[in-house]
Structures are given as structure tokens and as C-alpha cells.
Image (spheres, rainbow, N blue to C red):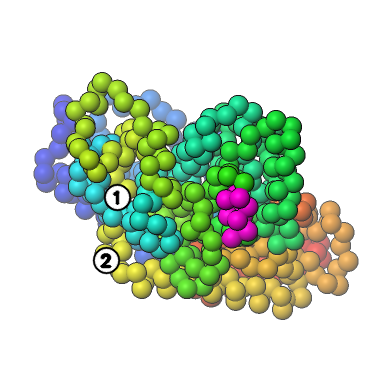
Amino acid sequence: MSDSLEMTPEQMLDLARKAAELLVDRIVKLPGENAWDGEFRQELEFRLMEDPPEDGRPAAGVLERAAREILPVTLRLDHPRSFGFIPSSPTWPGVVADFMTAGYHINQCTWLVASGPSQLELVIIDWFRRWLGYPENAGGLLTSGGSAASIDALVAAREAAGHPERATVYMSDQSHSALRRAAMIIGVRPELIRAVPSDDRFRLDVEALARAVTHDRAAGFNPIAVAANAGASSTGAIDPLEAMADYCEAEGIWLHVDAAYGGFAVVTDQGKKLLGGIERADSIGLDAHKWFFQPYETGCLLVKDARTLENALAVKHDILQDTIWGANHPNFSDHGLQLSRSVRALKIWMSVQTFGMGAFRRAVSNGMELAGRAEEYVRESRTLELLTPVSLGVVCFRINPAHAGLDEEALKKVNQKVLARVFWEDRAFFSSTTLRKTFALRLCIVNHTTTWDDVRETLETCERFGTEAVEE
């Protein structure tokens, strides 16, 4: 108990050491535990709903309680058998970098306030720029994630178009909800956000896009942006980026690529081929906390012309007048929606400096290789059915024994039952999606600690649970 908010150096070191020991112990034991541990709200309220203490408690005990009662009751996204949604597995240097930046207590809002971290962010942005093939006058910033990147991008697109009335935005019917939300936030009416049909591989149909734009312009609407997927969340599908770039250039429409999930495949030779044309987009959103193995809130927005962000988002106000530093000293608060912002570049920099790009390339390639092997396994299975060819690290399939003769409604119930059993009974965790009204099971394989045994045994469990569900 203390009468102040301070601790002695010894107390600080003891607490930090205890936290590190708990985290390392968690990481070491993680593969042998379940990927998911959830609890009902009533139980958690019983454990945690209480008044704050008037007097302090021993810090080590508080830390232990957090590690025992709160933090484990989650989806363990860094578990090697965590295949649901879009998981990730951060490097330890990235985790330590977050600890360091919190301890240095830096607000990376302007160059005056945070010159060193601002320069490091420029370094990281330049790395990403070169990997994607963007020109030297490209730029951007690190964001909390794809949602913030999408908002910043669409603001830039709106301003580049002259902020017209009756604005329309176009995206695939497979696009992430963050894009639709971003369009609404920048003032596009929900009914003017066009969901363009996708083809049999869940890629945007460029001819359908052209028809929609032509129809809207004839009706007096003003197309301001088209969003492409470079790794759709449900299927990993990559839209026809070259064809979309050709179209958008010819029509004078801003092209944004949502590469939050798939963009870092570009560090591999295979991924660079798959993402051909991404360098022609006006803006690109990336999430390093997905397939670049960083702790959360490490998103990124890149724009082909760095000036477009400042032109759209810079706002001058008196309290920040001292932050003018001179030419070529950027204030990142002029480039995005945040003024107060954490230091995000250090975790990427520390991770890459520690392991080298070769290790990162192998880790990204591992996800694609394991997804390819999973596709072969599903194709050869008499119990599982592949619903679309694998793209990047996503495998979409379902239980559908050839001999069972089940209708679609019965198949849906069987697959839902298998999914629920995996949640509660198996070490693995995966999620579902809906493809053309078909209920699909879905593995997203991006964790650098995942092995083929993790994937194979999860698929074998699906086959076993599926067979039992059909026979019930």
C-alpha cells in the first residue's frame, strides 16, 4: 500500500521481471493448451464486477490475478492452432518494443515532440514502399489498423475528387465491413456504397464495376473511389488488380487496395506475383499485426503521392503552432485522423533488426505452403469438400461426405455442429464464413509457429466430428 503513485526502482524491476516471467511462461506452454477459452458474461461479472479499492494492494498479486482471471479468457490468437478470423503471432522483440514505448511515454504526434520515433516511422514506411513497388514520392503513416487506414484513404480520395455531392464508392461483395464503415464515416450515404458482384473465385467483376459506374454517372452521381481486395477476409481472394488499375486510371477514380491481411505476402516471390498491380493503386492499407507478426495496433496506410494525405487532413490550430520545424520535417498528425498517437514503428524495426528479412520471408511463405498442403488434403478427403481454391493462407471447406446425400440445410447443421464441437472440445480454433449462401468452415493459416501437424490434426478432427455428426 502506498500514499503516492510512485514505486521504488526495486519495486519497478520486481514487477517488470514478474510480468516478463509470466509472459514467457505463457508462450512456452501455449502449444499444449487450447487455442480458445471463453466464458459467459454472468460468470465473468461474478468474478470481476466490484468497486475499485480505496487502498492499494500488492502489485505482484494484482498482476497474478490479471494473468489468472482476465487475460487467459480469450481467443489465443498466437496459438499455433488458432485458425479463426485472421490471427497473428507477434515476435518477442515486438512485444518488448511495446513495453519500451509505453515506458518512454512518447506521444508521436509531431516532429517537435517525437523526432526520433518520427524518423523511424519514415524508415519503416520507406521499407513498405519499396516492397510494394511504390515510387519515391509515395508516403504514408502507421495507424491503429485497417479501419483507420481505410478512413484516411477515403478522406484523401474524397478530397482528391473535389468533395463532390452525391458521392459513390465501389467495393466487392467480399470486402471487409471496415471499408463500408469508412465510407459511411466520410459522408457517403449507405445506399450509395455499391457492392459489386464477385466472380466464381470471389474476385471483383470488373465489367460489373464498369456498368455500375456508368449507370451512376448517368444518374448524376459522382464516383470517388473503388476499393480492391488483396486478400479478402473470407477467402483470401485477390481482386484483378491490374485490370482495376487500368479501369480506374482511364475513368479518373481513386483506387484503394485493402491489403490489411494479404499485403505482406509481397515480401515473398510468390506473393509478389500474386499481388501484381498493387503498386498502381492510389492508396494501400496494410496490417503488420496480421501477416508481419507484430503486436496489435500496427496498421499502415500508404499513398502513391505523399502530398495527398496532408492536402486532405492537415488542420492548423494555435496550440500546435510551435511544432513548425521547417521543410521536410513531417508531422504525422497532419497525415491521419489521430493527433495523440503511440510509437508503432519501433516494434517492426526491432523485429526485423533482430531476425532479418530472410526469417520473415520464410515465415510468410510457411503460411502459404501449409494452406496449399491443406487444400490437397481436403481434395483427397472423402468427408471434406473444398469450396473455393486456396488463396494466400485461407482454406474454405465444409463437411460433405459423398455417400451421405444431405441437402443444403442438413449440411449447414452438420457443419455448425462440428464448429461448435471444435470450440468446446478441441485444442484448435477456427471460424466460419458464408460463400454464396453456403455455410463454410474456414482456416486462416498465418502463424509462424504453426506446423503441418497442427493443420493436419485439425482437419482430421473435422473429419471425425463430421462423420459422427452425420451418423447421429
The quarter of the rendered structure image containing the N terminus is top left
Instruction: State if disc 1 and disc 2 touch (CB < 8 Å).
Output: no
For label 2, the residue is: 354
Label 1 element class: helix
Specify the quadrant that holds the C terminus.
Answer: bottom right
From the viewer's perspective, is 200 left or right of 28?
Answer: right
What residue type is disc 2 on?
Thr
Q: Position of residue 18 (x, y in %)?
A: 24, 52
Numbered circle sitting on residue 264: none
Query: Relative to the observer, which residue lies in front, 261 or 405?
Result: 261
Tell me residue 81's x, y (percent): 52, 64
Q: Is residue 261 left or right of residue 107?
A: right
Which residue is nearer to you in this view: 308 or 323? 308
Relative to 337, say whether 66 is above or below: below
- In terms of sequence position, does the residue under pointer 2 or pointer 1 come before the other? 1
Q: Which residues are magenta?
A: 242-250
Task: Find the distance from the CA under tag 2 to the CA under tag 1.
Answer: 17 Å
User: What crowding class fits label 1: few (fewer than 14 Cα within 10 Å), some (14-19), or many (20 or more)?
Assistant: many
- Tell me if residue 208 is in the magenta stretch: no
Give the quarter of the image for residue 92.
bottom left
Residue 243 counted in the magenta span: yes
Residue at image coords 27%, 66%:
354
Q: Judge from the rendering whether residue 368 lies leftward or rightward of residue 124; answer left or right.
A: right
- The amino acid beneath tag 1 is Glu
Q: Which residue, given by chain and number where applicable, does mark 1 sit on? A: 121
Q: Nearer the viewer, mark 2 or mark 1?
A: 1
Task: Decide if residue 12 is in sight here.
Answer: yes
Residue found 32% across the figure and 48% down from its top: 344
Q: Mostly what secondary structure, the magenta segment?
A: helix
Determine whether the residue tagged by mark 2 lies in a helix, strand or loop. Answer: helix
